[in-house]
Image (tube, rainbow, N blue to C red):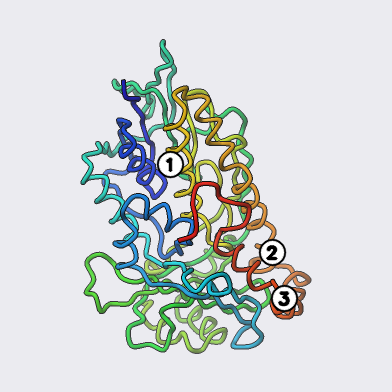
Amino acid sequence: MSKELAVVGVGPAGLAVAILLHDAGFRVTLYERFEQAGPVGSGLVLQPTGLAVLQQMGLREQIEDLGHRIDAMHGRIAPAGKSVLDIRYNALSESLYGVAIHRASLFSVLFDAVHARGIAVHTATCIDSIEHLAGAKVRLVDRGRRLTSTFDLVIDASGAGSRLTSHALKPARARALEYGALWATVNTAGTPFNHHRLEQRYRAARVMAGVLPCGRLPQDAPSCSRATYFWSIRNADHAAFVNAGLAAWRDQARAVWPQTDVLLEQIQSPEQLVHARYVHHTLMPPMGKSIVFIGDAAHSTSPQLGQGANMALLDARALAAALQSESNLQQAAKNYCRLRRLHVRFYQLASLSLTPFYQSDGTVLPALRDLLFGPVSRLPGSAALVTRLGAGLLFSPATAEAG
């Protein structure tokens, strides 16, 4: 008899694992707390690891059609000084690249694939607990109300704010990060910005501005070219930013990166700037009795290495592989944890360690960055190592090959 699986959360992790498990023959039901499922956030980069998972689902071509191929990531001291970030995919292979895409476009492709497979999606269900029943069955609890359906396994993909982590074997270790970011979607058609490169500018580590090409939204004309503009901000300073007004902020942003004036003029209201806060959070191991955790519910950190969506896709593929190869669900959950342990721990540590160089109030680490990162990147083998780090290929992800 096919196993009955419940997936909580309709983000990239939840949608991807539902597709992979459905295609493997499992019966899957999705639960989402919002009245209407939809994306949260702006642009992101799908690395070769994440693209390989999308290729397995038969969705890579659609993703590449909506996104922009990214060949390099480049960062300079503001306004246009020394290079302190230089990742070029061709340092590893001419065929290697990332794809930058808007979260709305990624969501659209995954959600359409879920509907095409006839996978049930229940919205407006805020799952905050699970109840263990006889025969190793599990029931979901929606704000204290027990749902009638029962499942063999619950997969929590509800993000860093998950209400289910109390069911993990060990308590989560979480720490709110001091810096977040403001994100806005802008149009880069007809501007001088390179559509195949992520660009950033830094002033010490207190200021970071970036432009990430992210293709087009599903409803856009093929000629449309969008990007995500992002601005680093201390979370404690957000209220002061709002009170000061957009004009004052735009003046500051222009001084850091004058060429972005054509993008900044498109931001006419505070509502266009989404304030994102980040939490460093890790479940070890990401499982409990009849429940497993994937994506940000299992591990989240700063976006400094841009691995979040890729890690979620890798989690989904690893869990699907573990459940296919082992009929005992608790053992399969342990196998999933083992498959992802090293890769997740390494990138959690790397992201946390690099964040003070780019987002902090410190002065020593940014000075060391400005002094050393450029020369070190020119040492033999350094370009390939840095590219492997940025592409998510260090400490084998175990479930994906570079495409």
Tell me the tag on residue 158. Answer: 1
Is 307 above or below relative to 97?
A: above
- Mark found first going from the N terminus, 2 or 3: 2
Mark 3, secondary structure of its residue? loop
Mark 1, secondary structure of its residue? loop
Q: Which of marks 1 and 3 is in front?
A: 3
| Label 1 close to label 2 by CB (< 8 Å) | no
Write the residue at 75% across / 69% down.
Answer: 365
Q: Quadrant of the C terminus?
A: bottom left
Q: Position of residue 162 (x, y in %)?
A: 48, 39
In front: 114, or 364? 114
In the picture of the structure, the residue carrying the numbered disc 3 is 380
In the picture of the structure, the residue carrying the numbered disc 2 is 356
In front: 270, or 328? 328
Tell me if mark 2 has few (under 14), some (14-19) or many (20+) residues whose alpha carbon lies within 10 angstroms of its own. Answer: some
Q: Which of marks 2 and 3 is in front?
A: 3
Q: Residue furthest toward the top? A: 134
Q: Which image quarter: residue 387? A: bottom right
Tell me if mark 3 has few (under 14), some (14-19) or many (20+) residues whose alpha carbon lies within 10 angstroms of its own. Answer: few
How many angstroms separate mark 2 from mark 3 (CA)? 26 Å
